[in-house]
């Protein structure tokens, strides 16, 4: 009887031990998971094959890591309530993250999502105490440095281009940390002006548009007036040149004629002087309608008077 009881006890113990081993020794991995096996705290194996696997109960510790799941980090806001069939998700701003300075010291309100996957389960578990917080801080550092080099207008309208620039810089920084993650995407959901500066920004844009319009009007006026002024100036210059050439040629001709007269005058001064006098008198007399000749040197009481215009006799 005692032997029977002992056998039953042994069987019960063996069954309990087998059940304990089955419950704590075997585990199942999905196709998207890796298992990190620790023995007394030391990593002894990384199991990547899906299916049923065995570990030593109590001694071994298994930590499953989903290496295919895309995980997200919200920057600048948090999800207050999730979306369901009755309502959309609601969000709460994180003020200490949202405000970022652009080039020139202008403020913008930024929201972003970073999506990543775990590529190295061991590195993700042990190389950093807070992987999610580290990714958030690294993203903030890269984003702020990038936007501080961007003018305000570029930051507001080219957020997709900024996200493209940030992604490889963020990946490179995380690689130096040995975090074991791959950044799948970076998306800037919002790049807006804070409400406090929106009115001032609108005023600046209005002034800028007015300035641009005035410049266009001035350029139009310039395009209309300057060519005409240049054409008028060209005409005046050409007329002045022609007038100059005419006067110079005329002066040269007059000098040449005078030199010829001078030469003849020097050869026969009396004859030449008389001829010049007669020619001048012809010109003067041809311009008058009434002509009289009076001999002022006549002697006696009679004044010699000769009317050359027949109408005078009438």
Image (cartoon, helix red, strand yellow):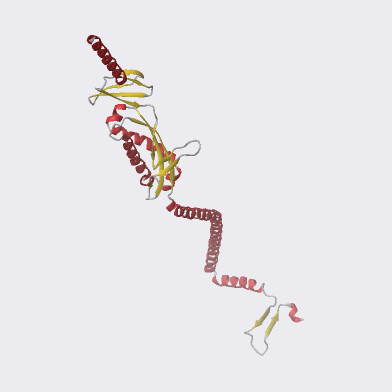
Q: Residue 74 vs residue 124: left or right?
A: right
> Which residue is more in the foreground, 77 or 302?
77
- Identified at 66% across, 82% down, the residue is 294
Residue 281 sits above or below residue 194 on the image? below
The quadrant in which the C terminus is found is bottom right
Q: Furthest-right residue in view?
A: 314
**Residue 119: percent from the left, percent from the top?**
34, 27
Residue 39 sits above or below residue 107 on the image? above
Q: Furthest-front residue in view?
A: 1
- Identified at 31% across, 35% down, the residue is 173
Q: Quadrant of residue 112?
A: top left
**Residue 181: percent from the left, percent from the top?**
34, 30
- Identified at 35% across, 41% down, the residue is 140
Q: Furthest-bottom residue in view?
A: 301
> Which residue is more in the foreground, 282 or 105?
105
Residue 251 sits above or below residue 125 on the image? below
Q: Residue 309 vs residue 232: left or right?
A: right
**Residue 285: percent from the left, percent from the top?**
66, 74
**Residue 36: percent from the left, percent from the top?**
29, 24
Tell me how many marks there are: 0
The quadrant in which the N terminus is found is top left
Q: Residue 34 vs residue 209: left or right?
A: left
> Which residue is more in the foreground, 233 or 100?
100
> Which residue is more in the foreground, 202 or 47?
47
């Amino acid at each position: 009887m005692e032997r029977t009881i002992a056998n039953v006890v042994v069987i019960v113990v063996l069954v309990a031990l087998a059940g304990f081993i089955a419950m704590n020794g075997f585990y199942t991995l999905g196709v998207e998971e890796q298992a990190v096996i620790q023995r007394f705290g030391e990593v002894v194996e990384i199991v990547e094959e899906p299916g049923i696997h065995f570990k030593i109960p109590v001694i071994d510790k298994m930590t499953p890591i989903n290496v295919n799941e895309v995980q997200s980090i919200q920057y600048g806001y948090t999800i207050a309530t999730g979306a369901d069939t009755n309502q959309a998700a609601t969000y709460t701003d994180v003020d200490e993250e949202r405000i970022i300075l652009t080039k020139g010291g202008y403020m913008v309100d930024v929201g972003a999502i970073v999506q990543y996957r775990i590529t190295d389960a061991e590195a993700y578990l042990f190389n950093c105490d807070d992987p999610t917080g580290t990714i958030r801080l690294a993203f903030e550092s890269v984003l702020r440095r990038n936007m501080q080099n961007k003018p305000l207008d570029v930051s507001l309208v080219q957020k997709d281009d900024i996200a493209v620039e940030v992604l490889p810089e963020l990946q490179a920084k995380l690689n130096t940390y040995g975090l074991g993650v791959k950044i799948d995407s970076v998306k800037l959901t919002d790049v807006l002006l804070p409400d406090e500066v929106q009115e001032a920004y609108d005023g600046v844009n209005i002034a800028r548009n007015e300035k641009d319009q005035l410049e266009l009007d001035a350029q139009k006026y310039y395009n209309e007036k300057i060519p005409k002024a240049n054409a008028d100036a060209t005409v005046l210059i050409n007329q002045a040149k022609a007038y100059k050439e005419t006067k110079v040629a005329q002066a040269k001709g007059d000098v040449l004629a005078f030199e010829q007269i001078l030469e003849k005058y020097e050869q026969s001064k009396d004859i030449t002087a008389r001829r010049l006098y007669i020619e001048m008198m012809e010109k003067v007399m041809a311009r008058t309608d009434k002509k009289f000749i009076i001999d002022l040197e006549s002697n006696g009481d009679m004044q010699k008077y000769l009317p050359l215009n027949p109408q005078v006799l009438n």
